[in-house]
Image (cartoon, rainbow, N blue to C red):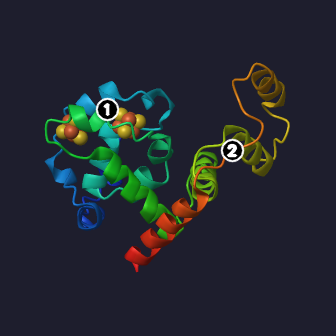
Amino acid sequence: MKIIGKKDIKADSSLAEEIARRSGENVFLCYQCRKCASGCPNRKFMDSTITELMRYVQLGMVDEAMKKNTIWYCLSCHTCSVRCPEDIDIPRVVDTLRILVEEKNIKADDNHSRLFNRLWMTIIKYLGRGYEVGLVGALNLLSGKPFKDLPLGFKMIKKGKLKLLPSIKKPFSMMKMFSRARKLKK
Ligand code: SF4
Ligand code: SF4
């Protein structure tokens, strides 16, 4: 956790207002009880906990909220939102931050997890469901480590834990859904 000094705090509410406008979630209801972070299954991989992220958004600390890996490591599992006494839909806040990062083309400190998210969404869009071999293969290739995970991948395919080829499920309906979402945005 980063120790925040006075000079880091801008107390600018524009980020929180933008999130409220887009998602309907009011981050100012958060009073830092930490119930969300204490139940988050991915918190040990995150640069900052989800509770800290809520504070960064309240204070308008754009770099802390949008450049760190926290928003990309969120699994959208909703453990945090069911624990939140203020009933804040936290994954919705996280999703809105991801959209803002993409729209504003903010360079994240950790582009690996952002790339993972982009590849995952592309696979879902075109195949209609997840395809782990393709996802990890493309991620490693684009990260300049094409042979990483290869021995483990072969072992898992041999044991039937992973499928070499994707099973395609209603790809056109998923593509239509993506294009409808794009039109709604305009
Ligand atoms: S939705 Fe995201 S932030 Fe909330 S508990 Fe799950 S992984 Fe953690
Ligand atoms: S559980 Fe809700 S109120 Fe508590 S810290 Fe998390 S977001 Fe804030």
- Can residue 32 be seen here? The reply is no
Instruction: Give the residue at the far bottom of this rendering.
Output: 186
| 13 lies above or below 95 | below
Q: Secondary structure at mark 1?
A: helix
| Category of crowding for the residue at label 2, using alpha-carbon neighbours closer than 10 angstroms: few (below 14), some (14–19), many (at least 20) | some
Q: Secondary structure at mark 2?
A: helix
Q: Amino acid at mark 2?
A: Leu
Front residue of 112/159: it is 159
Q: Residue at x 42, y 50 (%)?
A: 64
Position of the N terminus, as image quadrant, is top left
- Can residue 28 be seen here? The reply is yes
Where's residue 47, x and y in %?
47, 38
With 115 as the anchor, is 159 left or right in this view?
right
With 135 as the anchor, is 117 left or right in this view?
left
| 159 lies above or below 125 | above
With 48 as the anchor, is 136 left or right in this view?
right
Q: CA distance from mark 2 to mark 1?
A: 25 Å
Where's residue 181, x and y in %?
43, 69
Q: Amino acid at mark 1?
A: Thr
Q: Is mark 1 within 8 Å of ligand 1?
A: yes
Position of the C terminus, as image quadrant, is bottom left
Q: Residue at x 47, y 65 (%)?
A: 177
Q: Which mark is residue 79?
A: 1
- Ligand 1 shown in quarter: top left
Say which residue label 2 marks.
135
